[in-house]
Image (cartoon, coloured by chain):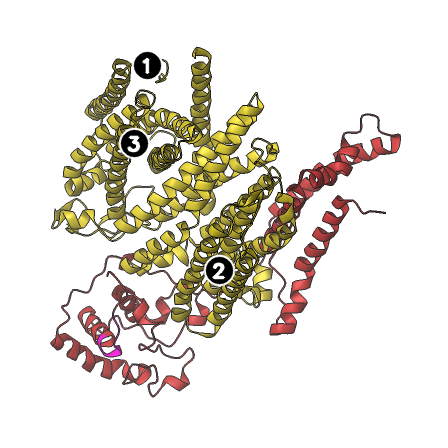
């Protein structure tokens, strides 16, 4: 892709936009041609088998890959826009440059997203024609809207990229284009989530299989899980985008040839990981809401998900999330070394580590423990007589809230690294903050213990009080923190770039873990439909309609993640080459 | 003499590992009367977490990380090792893969043990019931007919007031379900309750020993329409609603 700085004219910019639209149009024509031509040579069938690999697995891989790139191209514009606005408001070149850097990655990822989307369409049409007939009956009118929105998204996204330098003196207009990119991105998200949500929680139709009548298309579109899926995916996209951008910054940091480059990418990695972590904190709550709606729709699906055949996968999720907390805190601790004055807070690190590690252990202790026959005999079942209690929600909620609180405190210490409060009331302010934290710990742990003495229906409700206590504590802490450190004395500038290389591997770890989690959670969401294409309405009667073993499923997810990172590494390398070319040209 | 941090790390790791491997059982026995050791899957996870936490502790400062790695670097990267050190290096090179092989062998070797049926908690609704829906309207007539059927077939165990305290309740273990409790039918979809009535305790899947109550199979005694009427009566008179679509 040409760089906007090299061809500094509107004609070149519009040519770039035109090329983008032509590329998408050609792709769609090719997809249509392939489906039509191959369809001519195939016998009519409900299902077709893909050579060597099971049809379901191939669709799974393509759909997940498409979703990952889709999440990236929808999530990144959100904070690109925010970064650009911050840059304009604070007149900071640094933010503007970073926003442009992120957009460079974006522009290259659109092509891959569209390519995988085209493959998915071909795969579904040819391998699952009967299922496509069902979906077409329910959603055909939305497909045309979807195409129109895709074109609008591509138009504005390419225009946003190519007009970056041309509109550098008319930032208001450029920001407007950025808003349009995000609005159309959001429309894509809403539309695809309606289809996905319908497959899980269908409504608005009568009949079975392909003999259905659409009674209310709007109801089918705005099905039970539509809103929670939108919220969950929106937040997760931002989180995922931040993590991938962090990984890009780490890649550039490790390839950097000068201190200036190292400083720039160190800062970018910090911002990317900050965005990822900020979005990561509310994600479990959005997940709870999503899960609640699934339970409301069907007990069976809810039980399969949390207590039935998929329960062991949540165990893996817990381990990954615990590891993410450790990774995030390690990154902050390593970052504190580059802050003059940061050494003052080292004494708190061991306490925070103990809280996080203990929370991690509790969070990852399952209720039904994988055990050998001899171990089960010794325990009297799959529940350990003492540690089994750690598998209940009371313990989990306590653990995760404590981990969130500890991570927040760690970030606050990091923020204070090079600052000395000069306000007269700083001692009183710090005491009030300490009292707030201790009170929150008391509430969280207190409700955690009390939860064992009341019926489960009541104790589940305690999670709301725990979350409110933690969020309230964070809010009050910040309310004191900002005025208290206003005009604070600085102990020196943050020495961006002075980070050990292992810190950058933490950023890679965050990105891989988020991606793997996304694949795993996506599999659970889709898998709980069991042998239904559309739950309770259209049964999957193909040979692949069984729930695979967890080992196989996690293996497939791992392969998808590996291929995704190979592709994204290619995007990184192209972005770096493009930037270096631009630098040489200028 | 100052103890190297690597030695501290190994010491802490060994102590905690010992606690996980042999320390949990006596504590569990003291508290619950059952000397249950920690299952190996959980013990390995805790040990791995301990190792990661220790590594993290030494790695977040450059000086402590260098000091931590020092003995390892001295041993492995020594350009001119003494003959004894050389022998030790070679021994390590042989012992480590052998150890890894032995651990892998232990994990993969088949152990023949009789199967057990451990108690479960969450029972999945059989797939054949997923799309079953109540075909009857919630009319007073249907609910009233359900009440008559409930009194005839169910009240002896589940009680006139649906609280699980019927005449026979005290003789049964587990006790009949209390429908007024928010933890029973209020948390279930109608088709789940339909399954439980139709197939009774014998219809429960494997892994449900502790839950096999005296609930009989009503299929063949009651028609499906009658079961639905009873379900509507139970929900209405227990003052709860089926936990489903809002």
Q: Position of residue A559 (x, y in %)?
A: 45, 34
Q: Position of residue A367 (x, y in %)?
A: 50, 61
Q: Position of residue A71 (x, y in %)?
A: 35, 37
Mark 3 element type: helix
Can residue B112 be seen from the camera position used here?
no
Q: Say which of A179 and B202 sits in front.
A: A179
Residue at x 25% of width, y 14% of height: A11
The reply to whether callout 1 and callout 2 are in contact (CB within 8 Å) is no
Q: How crowded is the residue under tag 1: few (<14 C-alpha within 10 Å), some, or many (20+)?
A: some
Residue identified by numbered label 2:
A396
Look at the picture and state if A408 lies above or below A59.
Answer: below
Residue at x 38% of width, y 69% of height: A457
Q: Chain of mark 1?
A: A
Q: Same chain for the residues at labels 1 and 2, yes or no?
A: yes
Q: Is residue A544 magenta?
A: no
Closer to the chain start, of discs 2 and 3, is 3
Residue identified by numbered label 1:
A8
Q: Which chain's colour is red?
A: B
What residue range appears in magenta? Answer: B236-241
Look at the picture and state if B17 lies above or below A117.
Answer: below
Residue most extreme to the front: A424
Q: Chain of mark 2?
A: A
Residue identified by numbered label 3:
A175
Mark 2 element type: helix
Mark 1 element type: loop
Left or right of residue A45, residue A501 in this image: right
Left or right of residue A98, residue A143 in this image: left
Q: Nearer the viewer, mark 1 or mark 2?
A: 1
Residue at x 23% of width, y 38% of height: A46
Q: Which chain's colour is yellow?
A: A
The reply to whether callout 2 and callout 3 are in contact (CB within 8 Å) is no
Q: How crowded is the residue under tag 3: few (<14 C-alpha within 10 Å), some, or many (20+)?
A: some
């Amino acid at each position: 892709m040409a760089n906007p700085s090299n061809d500094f004219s509107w004609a070149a910019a519009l040519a770039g936009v035109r090329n983008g639209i032509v590329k998408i149009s050609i792709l769609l024509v090719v997809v249509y041609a392939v489906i039509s031509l191959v369809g001519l040579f195939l016998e009519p069938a409900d299902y077709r088998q893909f050579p060597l690999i099971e049809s379901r697995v191939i669709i799974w891989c393509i759909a997940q890959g498409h979703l990952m790139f889709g999440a990236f191209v929808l999530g990144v514009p959100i904070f690109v826009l925010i970064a650009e606005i911050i840059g304009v408001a604070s007149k900071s070149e640094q933010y503007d440059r970073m926003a442009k850097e992120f957009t460079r990655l974006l522009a290259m990822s659109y092509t891959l997203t569209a390519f995988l989307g085209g493959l998915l369409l071909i795969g579904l049409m040819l391998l699952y024609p009967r299922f496509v007939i069902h979906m077409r009956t329910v959603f055909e009118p939305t497909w045309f809207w979807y195409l129109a929105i895709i074109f609008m998204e591509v138009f504005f996204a390419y225009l946003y990229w190519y007009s970056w330098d041309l509109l550098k003196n008319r930032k208001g207009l450029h920001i407007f284009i950025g808003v349009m990119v995000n609005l159309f991105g959001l429309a894509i998200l809403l539309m695809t989530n309606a289809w996905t949500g319908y497959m899980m929680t269908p409504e608005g139709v009568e009949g079975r299989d392909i003999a259905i009548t659409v009674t209310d298309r709007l109801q089918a579109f705005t099905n039970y899980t539509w809103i929670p899926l939108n919220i969950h995916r929106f937040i997760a996209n931002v989180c995922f985008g931040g993590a991938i951008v962090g990984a890009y910054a780490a890649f550039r940091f490790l390839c950097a040839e000068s201190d200036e480059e190292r400083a720039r990418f160190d800062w970018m990695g910090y911002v990317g990981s900050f965005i990822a972590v900020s979005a990561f904190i509310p994600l479990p709550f959005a997940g709870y809401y999503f899960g609640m709606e699934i339970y409301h729709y069907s007990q069976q699906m809810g039980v399969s998900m949390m207590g039935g055949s998929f329960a062991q996968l949540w165990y893996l999720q817990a381990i990954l999330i615990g590891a993410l907390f450790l990774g995030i805190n390690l990154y902050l601790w390593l970052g504190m070394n580059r802050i003059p004055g940061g050494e003052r807070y080292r004494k708190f690190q061991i306490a925070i580590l103990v809280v996080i590690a203990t929370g991690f252990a509790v969070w990852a202790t399952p209720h039904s423990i994988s055990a050998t026959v001899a171990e089960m005999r010794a325990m009297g079942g799959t529940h350990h007589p003492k540690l089994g209690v750690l598998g209940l929600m009371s313990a989990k909620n306590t653990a995760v809230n404590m981990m969130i609180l500890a991570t927040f405190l760690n970030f606050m210490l990091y923020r204070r690294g090079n600052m000395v409060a000069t306000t007269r009331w700083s001692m009183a302010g710090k005491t009030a903050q300490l009292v707030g934290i201790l009170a929150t710990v008391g509430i969280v742990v207190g409700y955690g213990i009390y939860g064992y003495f009341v019926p489960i229906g009541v104790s589940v409700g305690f999670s709301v009080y725990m979350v409110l206590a933690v969020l309230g504590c964070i809010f009050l802490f910040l309310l004191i923190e900002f005025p208290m450190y206003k005009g604070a004395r600085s102990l020196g500038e943050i020495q961006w770039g002075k980070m050990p290389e292992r810190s950058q591997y933490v950023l890679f770890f965050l990105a891989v873990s988020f991606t793997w989690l996304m694949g795993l959670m996506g599999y659970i969401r889709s898998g709980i439909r069991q042998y239904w294409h559309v739950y309770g309405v259209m049964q999957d009667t193909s040979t692949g309609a069984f729930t695979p073993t967890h080992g196989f499923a996690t293996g497939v997810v791992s392969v998808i993640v590996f291929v995704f990172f190979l592709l994204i590494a290619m995007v990184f390398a192209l972005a770096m080459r493009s930037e270096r070319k631009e630098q040489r040209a200028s | 003499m100052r103890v190297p941090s690597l030695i501290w790390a190994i010491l802490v790791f060994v102590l905690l590992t010992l606690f996980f491997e042999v320390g949990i059982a006596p504590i569990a026995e003291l508290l619950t009367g059952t000397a249950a050791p920690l299952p190996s899957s959980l013990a390995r996870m805790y040990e791995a977490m301990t190792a990661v936490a220790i590594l993290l502790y030494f790695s977040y400062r450059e000086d402590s990380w260098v000091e931590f790695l020092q003995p390892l670097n001295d041993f492995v990267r020594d350009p001119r090792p003494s003959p004894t050190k050389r022998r030790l290096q070679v021994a390590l090179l042989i012992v480590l893969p052998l150890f890894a092989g032995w651990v892998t062998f232990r994990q993969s070797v088949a152990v023949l043990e009789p199967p057990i049926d451990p108690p479960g908690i969450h029972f999945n609704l059989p797939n054949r019931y997923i799309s079953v829906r109540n075909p009857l309207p919630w009319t007073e007539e249907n609910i009233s007919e359900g009440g008559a059927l409930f009194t005839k077939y169910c009240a002896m165990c589940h009680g006139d007031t649906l609280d699980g305290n019927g005449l026979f309740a005290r003789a049964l273990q587990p006790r009949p379900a209390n429908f007024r409790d928010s933890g029973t039918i209020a948390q279930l979809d109608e088709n789940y309750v339909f399954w439980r009535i139709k197939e009774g305790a014998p219809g429960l899947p494997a892994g449900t020993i502790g839950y096999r109550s005296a609930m009989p199979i009503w299929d063949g005694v009651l028609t499906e329409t009658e079961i639905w009427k009873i379900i509507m009566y139970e929900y209405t008179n227990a003052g709860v609603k089926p936990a489903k679509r809002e």
